[in-house]
């Protein structure tokens, strides 16, 4: 795990984590697949969780005044249920099935947006509780099994028409909460060895720098371009999940 390949891929994965915490949530989903080129996907997910948590601290400060409280109050409790279900079923649900479900949801939603068909309730009224509970639980579950909570989260949040900084801040605060909840089951499953924690501490350095870069990008990108890039990234990552499901990755 300590070879040059690991550190190159680990630094790239850490930068992706940091950018996601800076307000570009979809790119963080690429971190585990990237690091899994050097170590097993399970080991990659466990090693990167402390990197996510360290990056969360910077992201929380950057977006401390820019988030939607109603969205968080709906999604957060549901996500705890999803994480709990992921913990209970960690040994019995195939990774391929999770990848396929996440990929199909993301592709369908991204194509809907890219083809110009905005969801009916886009930008109208407050966030709804029923759909929020469903998508929050799905987000918690997929985040637990592979740090892949962005597609179901965005299916719920993108149609709400949040301003780009509030959109980015809400994602940052929400996933910081989810990652904190995940620490308990990940510890119980033996994911935090001394070697993992040492490597995570080193990889947290480029991740923290990337958080600041992500915050800057969110601020300077035009809002229309920002959401267009987020949607294309969602499509690309979702297609990667479908590929993994098809080939057994």
Image (tube, rainbow, N blue to C red):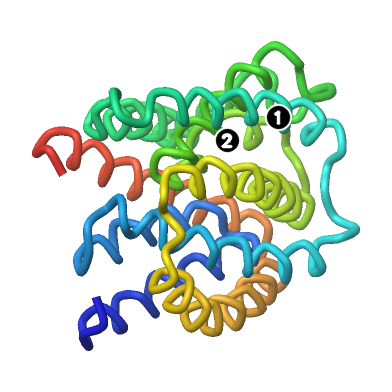
Q: Residues within 10 Å of mark 1 (few under 14, many from 20)?
A: many
Which of 21/84 is in front?
84
Determine whether 112 is above or below 25 in the image. Answer: above
Question: Which comes before the other along the chain, label 2 or label 1?
Answer: 1
Which of 163/172 is in front?
172
Which of 204/89 is in front?
89
Determine whether 214 is above or below 107 in the image. Answer: below
Residue at 49 percent across and 30 percent down: it is 141
Dot 1 falls on a residue whose secondary structure is helix
Left or right of 178? Residue 123 is right
Q: Position of residue 37 (x, y in %)?
A: 20, 65
Determine whether 189 is above or below 131 in the image. Answer: below
Residue at 68 percent across and 52 percent down: it is 176
- Name the residue that disc number 2 marks: 153
Of all residues, the one furthest to the top in this rendering is 130
Of all residues, the one furthest to the left in this rendering is 247
Q: Position of residue 187 (x, y in %)?
A: 51, 49
Determine whether 114 is above or below 201 in the image. Answer: above
Of discs 2 and 1, which sits in the foreground?
1
Of all residues, the one furthest to the bottom in this rendering is 4
- Name the residue that disc number 1 marks: 75
From mark 2 to mark 1, how far is it between C-alphas?
A: 9 Å
Q: Position of residue 9 (x, y in %)?
A: 29, 76
Left or right of 17? Residue 106 is left
Asked whether the beta carbons under mark 2 and mark 1 sit within 8 Å of each other, the answer is yes
Tell me the quarter of the picture where residue 220 sits.
bottom right
Q: Position of residue 162 (x, y in %)?
A: 76, 42
């Amino acid at each position: 795990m300590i070879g040059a390949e690991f550190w190159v891929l680990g630094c790239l994965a850490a930068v992706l984590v940091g950018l996601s915490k800076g307000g570009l949530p979809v790119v963080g989903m690429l971190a585990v697949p990237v690091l899994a080129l050097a170590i097993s996907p399970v080991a990659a997910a466990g090693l990167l969780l402390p990197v996510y948590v360290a990056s969360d601290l910077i992201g929380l400060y950057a977006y401390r005044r820019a988030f939607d409280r109603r969205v968080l109050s709906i999604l957060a409790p549901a996500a705890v249920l999803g994480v709990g279900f992921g913990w209970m079923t960690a040994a019995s649900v195939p990774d391929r099935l999770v990848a396929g479900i996440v990929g199909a949801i993301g592709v369908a939603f991204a194509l809907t947006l890219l083809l110009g068909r905005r969801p009916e309730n886009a930008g109208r009224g407050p966030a709804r509780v029923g759909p929020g509970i469903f998508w929050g639980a799905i987000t918690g579950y997929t985040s637990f099994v592979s740090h892949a909570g962005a597609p179901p989260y965005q299916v719920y949040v993108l149609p709400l028409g949040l301003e780009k900084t509030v959109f980015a801040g809400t994602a940052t605060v929400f996933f910081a909460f989810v990652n904190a909840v995940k620490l308990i089951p990940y510890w119980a499953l033996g994911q935090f060895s001394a070697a993992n924690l040492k490597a995570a501490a080193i990889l947290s350095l480029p991740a923290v720098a990337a958080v600041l870069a992500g915050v800057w990008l969110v601020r300077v990108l035009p809002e229309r371009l920002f959401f267009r890039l987020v949607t294309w990234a969602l499509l690309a990552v979702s297609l990667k999940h479908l590929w993994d499901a098809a080939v057994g990755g």
